[in-house]
Amino acid sequence: MNRLDVAAAVVIRGGKLFLATRQSGSQYGGLWEFPGGKAEPGESLEECIIRELREELAWEVLSAQELGVLLQERPGQRELALHFMRCTVSEGGEPLPQDGQQARWFSPDEWDSLEMAPLDRKFLEDHRGEMLAWLRQS
């Protein structure tokens, strides 16, 4: 089976990390995640995250760079490849959720208490040091 590529945005600004909730009714609905979505056929990961953040949050991505990927086996389905993309978004513009999801900026002291989708939690834990360094620079 081939795999399902999904791009997820890692956005840091003003000492905080941006997260949104998964849509209710979906797997892990209501849990916090790095926002993003499925890549369409022939679409690059950068094109995907630009499109997804525009559609879901009315947010303009200025640049995106892949930080890493986590793979998840899904019996009877395509393997999931979740690509985490460090994104720079337009200054001043705050995200405007288009699909009823919650969206918020979180300081590092809030991260551990968040109920997160499993792969998003793993990425946050694996890359905590890098993200804390980026927060200090933001």
Image (tube, rainbow, N blue to C red):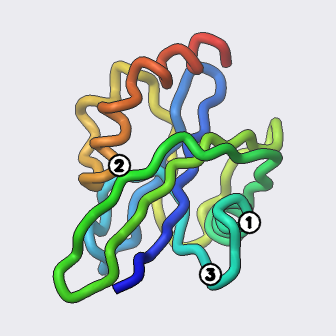
Disc with the residue nearer the chain's start (1 vs 3)? 3
Q: Secondary structure at mark 1?
A: helix
Which residue was labeled with disc 2?
120
**Residue type highlighted by circle 2:** Asp
**Image quadrant in which you'd find residue 48:** bottom right
SS label for mark 2: helix
The image quadrant that residue 65 belongs to is top right
Where residue 44 sits in the image (x, y, percent)? 69, 67
Instruction: Tell me which numbered mark, 2 or 3, is placed earlier along the sequence.
Output: 3
In the displayed structure, does residue 75 sit left or right of residue 91? left
Q: Which residue is mark 3?
A: 40
Q: Residues within 10 Å of mark 3 (few under 14, many from 20)?
A: few
Q: Amino acid at mark 3?
A: Glu
In the displayed image of the protein, which residue is found farthest to the left?
Answer: 75
Query: What kind of element bears circle 3?
Result: loop
Q: Are marks 2 and 1 in contact (CB under 8 Å)?
A: no
Q: Which mark is residue 47?
A: 1
